[in-house]
């Protein structure tokens, strides 16, 4: 169980016990705040004995000597000052948060000698702390040994010369942390707790932030002709939902930007049932919908000057006697017919109706959909990059740049006529899978048939939304991937 961090900023700190965390670059002779925390020069001696050289994200943990104003001192290495990026400040905050245990207060000195620390860097550091502090232990009745239990909350004072600027910048960082951690919560929740109706209720909670939320029921979707989405849901006793979230922070005349998420709350594969090994991970097959919900939380929390729409299709894919069969033909909201070759290629059936509805109703500037869509993208890119498919070079370039800035990296994959013809069907307008070869690409081409001429991007996040490698800012199975990426995109290009 991790402690809740209560972060504040100050130009100086009154030290009386607790933990002090200092930062140091390779070139700096001393660490930030060393003269305050360590007047006796213990850090220099400890660093020499431990051969601590301040390599990036390395740490030196010292029990403070008798008479020191604190109980413990931790020095975090930043590496070379010239190579520091915004993401390094995020990672440093995560590394610092990982060292907070058995204490209820900590002072963090971040103004490293010889290095100009901006208010933005201080806010990024604090964001890294919040992201690392996240844990999901709701269902654990035993929280570990009493001696290892952290305090329920830790008061963290970040000491920096521009405390006022850092505090102002941190208001946005808190919003981002809230959105990422909401997305993580949604992915981590067990499938017996979070069904389509319950997920829709979570989306409804964004109303308290000023988001307008509509929940479409099965009856309303049937009236709209969403036969593709409803075909996936028909094998489950849990009814489907379509949640429509609107944040109106821009000018009334501005067309919205739109985000669409796949929300398969559990995916057995349907009649084309998956192997048993690892099927429990399919509770995370709604990672795209989680990211869209988390993003809407961020935009509303930081009062983003943009009109944004978030739409999530929420279904459960089960194999009961009413489930759709391989060979069935369904009619999508667009009127296009689809031969269902494999019921485990269900996410694209959910998304195609959600995309068409979004485009038809809102006429957005662009549409970006996120989905844990294919295992093939994990084979291609592993857990490092998400796959990017797009019909628009400008949007693709903006997303790629946002991915590099947020370190939620994307790799653009090809589209083309030779791939598109692989999903042509003998019996319908298209089939829902083109077979094993180029599986991620043919899935993208399927979605492309439902966006018309609107600039569009499809992010296949199967390798990054869940079970991705843990790092300094994420120790969670559900990573919240996509929230920071898309917030960066909106912030950089689409706010008025």
Image (spheres, rainbow, N blue to C red):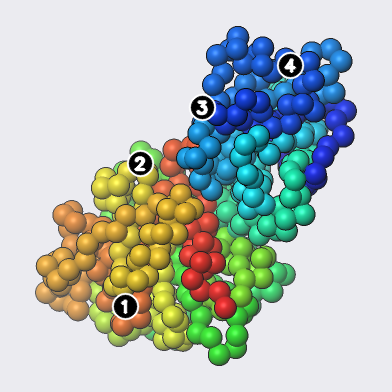
* Residue 64 in sight: yes
- In the rendered image, residue 145, in percent from the top left (x then y), is placed at 71, 22
Q: CA distance from mark 1 to mark 4?
A: 66 Å
> Residue at the location (68% across, 38% down)?
110
> Residue at the location (61% across, 67% down)?
299
> Residue at the location (30% across, 64% down)?
389
Q: CA distance from mark 2 to mark 3?
A: 44 Å
> Badge 4, how many Cα within 10 Å: few under 14, some, many 20+?
few
The residue where tag 1 is placed is 450
Q: Earlier in the sequence, mark 2 or mark 3?
A: 3
Q: Which mark is residue 307?
A: none
> Residue at the location (79% across, 20% down)?
39
Which secondary structure lies at badge 1? loop
Q: Are marks 2 and 4 in contact (CB under 8 Å)?
A: no
- In the rendered image, residue 307, in percent from the top left (x then y), is placed at 56, 79
Q: Is residue 361 above or below residue 471?
A: below
Where the C terminus falls, by quadrant? bottom right
Q: CA distance from mark 1 to mark 2?
A: 33 Å
Q: Which mark is residue 41?
A: 4
Q: CA distance from mark 4 to mark 3?
A: 20 Å
Quadrant location of residue 111? Answer: top right
Which secondary structure lies at badge 3? loop
* Residue 139 in sight: no
Horizontally, is 23 left or right of 81 in the view? right
């Amino acid at each position: 169980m991790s402690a809740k961090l209560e972060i504040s900023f100050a130009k100086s700190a009154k030290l009386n016990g607790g933990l002090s965390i200092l930062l140091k670059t390779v070139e700096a002779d001393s660490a930030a705040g060393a003269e305050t925390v360590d007047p006796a020069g213990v850090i220099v001696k400890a660093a020499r004995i431990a051969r601590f050289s301040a390599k990036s994200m390395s740490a030196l943990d010292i029990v403070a000597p008798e008479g020191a104003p604190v109980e413990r001192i931790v020095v975090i290495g930043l590496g070379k000052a010239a190579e520091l990026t915004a993401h390094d400040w995020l990672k440093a905050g995560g590394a610092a948060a990982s060292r907070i245990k058995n204490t209820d207060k900590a002072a963090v000195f971040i103004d490293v000698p010889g290095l100009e620390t901006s208010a933005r860097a201080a806010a990024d550091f604090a964001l890294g702390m919040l992201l690392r502090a996240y844990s999901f232990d709701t269902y654990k009745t035993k929280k570990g040994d009493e001696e290892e239990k952290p305090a329920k909350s830790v008061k963290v004072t970040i000491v920096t010369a521009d405390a006022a600027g850092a505090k102002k910048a941190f208001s946005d960082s808190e919003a981002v942390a809230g959105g990422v951690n909401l997305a993580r919560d949604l992915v981590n929740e067990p499938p017996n707790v979070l069904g389509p109706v319950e997920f829709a209720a979570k989306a409804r909670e964004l109303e308290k932030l000023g988001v307008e939320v509509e929940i479409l029921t099965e009856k309303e979707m049937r009236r709209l002709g969403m036969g593709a989405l409803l075909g996936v849901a028909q094998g489950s006793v849990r009814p489907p939902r379509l949640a429509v979230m609107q944040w109106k922070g821009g000018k009334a005349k501005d067309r919205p930007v739109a985000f669409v998420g796949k929300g398969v709350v559990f995916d057995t594969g349907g009649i084309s049932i998956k192997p048993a090994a690892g099927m429990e991970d399919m509770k995370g097959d709604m990672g795209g919908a989680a990211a869209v919900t988390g993003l809407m939380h961020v935009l509303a929390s930081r009062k983003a000057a943009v009109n944004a729409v978030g739409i999530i299709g929420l279904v459960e894919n089960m194999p009961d006697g009413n489930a759709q069969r391989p060979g069935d033909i369904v009619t999508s909201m667009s009127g296009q017919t689809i031969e269902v070759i494999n019921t485990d290629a269900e996410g694209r059936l959910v998304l195609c109706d959600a995309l068409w509805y979004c485009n038809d109703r809102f006429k957005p500037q662009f549409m970006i959909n996120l989905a844990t869509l294919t295992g093939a993208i994990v084979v291609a890119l592993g857990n490092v990059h998400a796959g990017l498919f797009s019909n628009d070079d400008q949007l693709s370039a903006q997303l790629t740049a946002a991915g590099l800035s947020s370190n939620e990296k994307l790799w653009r994959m090809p589209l083309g006529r030779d791939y598109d013809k692989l999903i042509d069907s003998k019996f319908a307008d298209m089939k829902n899978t083109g077979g094993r070869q180029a599986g991620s690409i043919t899935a993208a081409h399927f979605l492309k048939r439902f966006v018309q001429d609107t600039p569009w991007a499809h992010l296949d996040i199967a390798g990054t939304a869940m079970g991705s490698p843990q790092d300094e800012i994420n120790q969670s199975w559900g990573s919240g991937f996509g929230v920071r990426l898309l917030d960066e995109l909106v912030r950089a290009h689409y706010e008025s």
